[in-house]
Amino acid sequence: MDLINALILTFTPLFVAIDAIGNVPIVLSLSSEMGKAERQRLVNIALMTAGLVGLIFLLVGRFVLRLLNIEIYHFAVGGGLVLFILSVRDLATGKMVDVPSKEEMLAVVPLGTPITVGPATLTTLIVLADSYNLWLVLTSFTLNMAATWVIFHQANTIGRFMGQGGLKAFSKVMSLLLAAIAVRIIIGGLKGLFPGQP
């Protein structure tokens, strides 16, 4: 039961940060002029890119922080602020990041990163890795990548079922949850930096 709880506690923040369902309209927009095979290839390359970026950051992120003499609490406060700003930006403008023109290599940028694995996901990964076993965070990240792959491949079906309004509403709820998670991360970082304070 403890293992299941830990898996849920690591899977959920990543699922919220990645916001695969909320990103379905972006997938549909970027692949609007593509055939089925091209769309599948787009998603496959994007998820391989996202998985690789997340894995590298998960494995060497803490080393980079030590190299720069940055404590995990500093990163928690800074990363939590980034998460909070991104979530508020999404709530206010409807997007966390700006999508460049279609002349870009769409599968890698922006779909793979920063849309799927961007600042919110990377911050969540490094904070989770400090609180849970690395293999547990890696398992949750892998499960999230698999879930995102399925969701992106079913983007047309999900879009028809939920409608534009439903997708936007779901994305707003996810952004609100991400803001709450960001506040919790910031408070935890501040408590680590100032352990004697209430």
Image: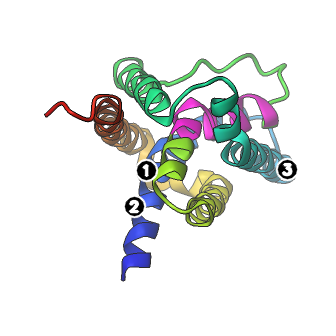
**At x 43% / y 50%, what residue is drawn?**
13
Residue, disc 2? 9
Q: Earlier in the sequence, mark 3 or mark 1?
A: 1
Q: What is the quadrant of the N terminus in the image?
A: bottom left
- Label pair 2/1, CB-CB below 8 angstroms: yes
In space, the residues marked 2 and 1 are separated at their CA atoms by 7 Å
Q: Position of residue 85 (x, y in %)?
A: 40, 20
Q: Position of residue 90 (x, y in %)?
A: 41, 25
Residue stretch in magenta = 108-123
Viewer-side residue, 194 vs 53: 194
Q: Position of residue 81 (x, y in %)?
A: 40, 23
- Tag 3 secondary structure: helix
Residue 48 is one of the magenta-drawn residues = no
In space, the residues marked 3 and 2 are separated at their CA atoms by 32 Å
Q: What is the quadrant of the C terminus in the image?
A: top left
**At x 61% / y 33%, what residue is drawn?**
118
Crowd around label 1: few <14 · some 14–19 · many ≥20 (10 Å): many
Q: Which mark is residue 13?
A: 1
Whether residue 2 is visible to the viewer of this picture, yes or no, is yes
Establish if 47 lies above or below 122: below
Residue 115 is one of the magenta-drawn residues = yes
Task: State which quadrant residue 148 falls in.
Answer: bottom right
Whether residue 94 is visible to the viewer of this picture, yes or no, is no
**At x 73% / y 42%, what residue is drawn?**
60
Task: State which quadrant residue 150 falls in.
Answer: bottom right
- Tag 1 secondary structure: helix
Identify the amino acid type marked 3. Arg
Q: Which mark is residue 41?
A: 3
